[in-house]
Amino acid sequence: MAMVHVEKARRVDVELSIALLNADMAERLEKLLGVFYEEGEVYHSSFVDEEGITKACGCPLLPLKSHIKGPAPVSDQDRTDIVDEAITFFRANVFFRNFDIKSSADKLLIYLTLYINVALKRLEGCRTLAVGTKAIINLGLENVPVPGESGFPFGGLFALPQTQQEAELFRNYLKQIREETSGRLLSVAYRPNGTPNKWWLAFAKRKFMNIIVP
């Protein structure tokens, strides 16, 4: 599975030059690629086997390679998890206006793709890793809504919680996975010397599924 993700990551890099062109060139090129983005397929999650996986709000609480406290089961460090998939596929999936869901895990992939989009928007203009880290910490302090609450971005995609306990379980899982995603995103959005990685921060301007990022 890891080799498959490496190959897909290489294919994702084909999209990078689009974001680095000036606005006029990017607009013209996107029009030329319109058919591809309308008819092409997004990258889907490989986590289709949900046997033994707890669900909340119709979403599987998948294992994470994380030491962050939360309800997610702990995944082996040498295995790919949903955060790896979201980051690996982000620079391709962010171009799509629609996402054909093939498994419940795709819902989580969609949520994380938008979250990465939001996080990159917050990192835009942060010229050092230290400043970027502060921006991400502030993002982590914000309220995390669940389906049925104001501010949840995907009404209708996730099932409403049937109990307050289910709502809090899902909220805590989202908090955990957002924090884990933030940490890994910082490691690719900034180079080892602490300077911004333009191959990532340029994607702050994208609008996943036409959702305007605040």
Image (spheres, helix red, strand yellow):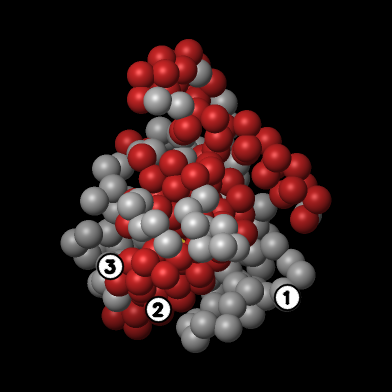
Q: Name the residue under label 2.
A: 172
Q: In the image, what residue type sits under mark 3? A: Pro
x then y, percent, for residue 2: 77, 55
The residue sitting at 33% across, 52% down in the picture is 125
Say few, some or many: other residues with alpha carbon within 10 Å of mark 2 (under 14 / 14 to 19 / 20 or more): some
Q: Could you say which quadrant of the image residue 27 lies in? A: top left
Q: Earlier in the sequence, mark 2 or mark 3?
A: 3
x then y, percent, for residue 198: 49, 45
The local secondary structure at tag 3 comes to loop
Q: In the image, what residue type sits under mark 2? A: Asn
> Vertically, is 93 above or below 5?
above
Q: How far apart are marks 3 and 1 (CA)?
A: 29 Å
Q: In the image, what residue type sits under mark 1? A: Asp
Choose mark 3 or mark 1, whichever is in front. 1
The residue sitting at 27% across, 59% down in the picture is 152
x then y, percent, for residue 6: 74, 48
Q: Distance between the residues labelled 2 and 1?
A: 21 Å
Left-right relation of 60 to 88:
left
> Vertically, is 141 above or below 47?
below
Q: How far apart are marks 2 and 3 (CA)?
A: 10 Å
The residue sitting at 36% across, 58% down in the picture is 126
Q: Could you say which quadrant of the image residue 21 lies in? A: top left
x then y, percent, for residue 60: 53, 66
* Nearest to the observer: residue 154 or residue 140: 140
Residue 148 visible? The answer is yes
The residue sitting at 48% across, 83% down in the picture is 70
Q: Name the residue under label 1.
A: 76
Q: Mark 3 points at which residue?
A: 145
Q: Earlier in the sequence, mark 2 or mark 1?
A: 1
Q: Are marks 2 and 1 in contact (CB under 8 Å)?
A: no
